[in-house]
Amino acid sequence: MKKPLLFLLTLSFFVFTSCDDIIDCIINVRPELPDKTFEIGYVNEFYYQDIRAEIKNEPRDDDYAYYFDDITNLPDGLEMFVDHRTIYIEGIPQTSGSYTFTVYLYVDPPVYYDYDTDTYEDSLCSDSTSKTYTIIIN
């Protein structure tokens, strides 16, 4: 009795989730931002950190398009730059304090063309994620 119930529960999970491809959800192919502790910065001294996004369990994650939402609440004097899947935070902080901000990441899978001119794209279990970080300036 337990095996049919377990099978039905598992099947219903995949039917009602937003995953387009069950295998990708089992493998857990999704965008990911790293857990990161930023180095402590100092007022009037150059500061630099980066955050590199990836697609978890995907060896071709450079093929995806990465989109980051505006990051607010950076210390005065620091700026954010994006280069493909890496965010660079750099500059000369002007005020001390603790600054917490959230990075929002959205990705589009690559589109492939086969020999019959059909197109297809990799599917993801999720196409977005976010993570909160803190920068401390002394």
Image (spheres, rainbow, N blue to C red):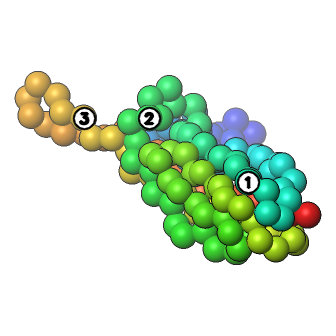
Which sits in the foreground, 24 or 101?
101
Q: Residue type at mark 1?
A: Phe
Quarter that holds the C terminus: bottom right
> How many angstroms separate mark 1 from mark 2 (CA)?
29 Å
Query: Residue 21, how many percent across, how many down?
Result: 43, 42
**Residue drawn at the location 83% of the way across and 56% of the way down:** 41
Does residue 88 appear to the left or right of 6 in the view shown?
left
Does residue 22 appear to the left or right of 10 in the view shown?
left
Say what secondary structure mark 2 lies in.
helix
**Residue drawn at the location 57% of the way across and 31% of the way down:** 57
> How many angstroms separate mark 3 from mark 2 (CA)?
14 Å
Query: Residue 114, how many percent across, how many down?
Result: 16, 28
Query: Residue 4, how many percent across, how many down?
Result: 65, 40
Say what secondary structure mark 1 lies in.
loop
Q: Is residue 109 visible?
A: yes
Q: Residue type at mark 3?
A: Tyr
| Labels 3 and 2 touching (C-beta < 8 A) | no
Say what secondary structure mark 3 lies in.
strand
Residue highlighted by disc 1: 46
Q: Is residue 8 visible?
A: no
Q: Quadrant of residue 25?
A: top right
* Mark sitting earlier along the chain (3/2): 2
Query: Residue 118, how many percent across, how many down?
Result: 13, 37
Residue highlighted by disc 2: 62
User: Is residue 48 shown above or below 16?
Assistant: above
Q: Quadrant of residue 96?
A: bottom right
Quarter that holds the N terminus: top right
Does residue 47 appear to the left or right of 31 in the view shown?
right
Residue highlighted by disc 3: 112
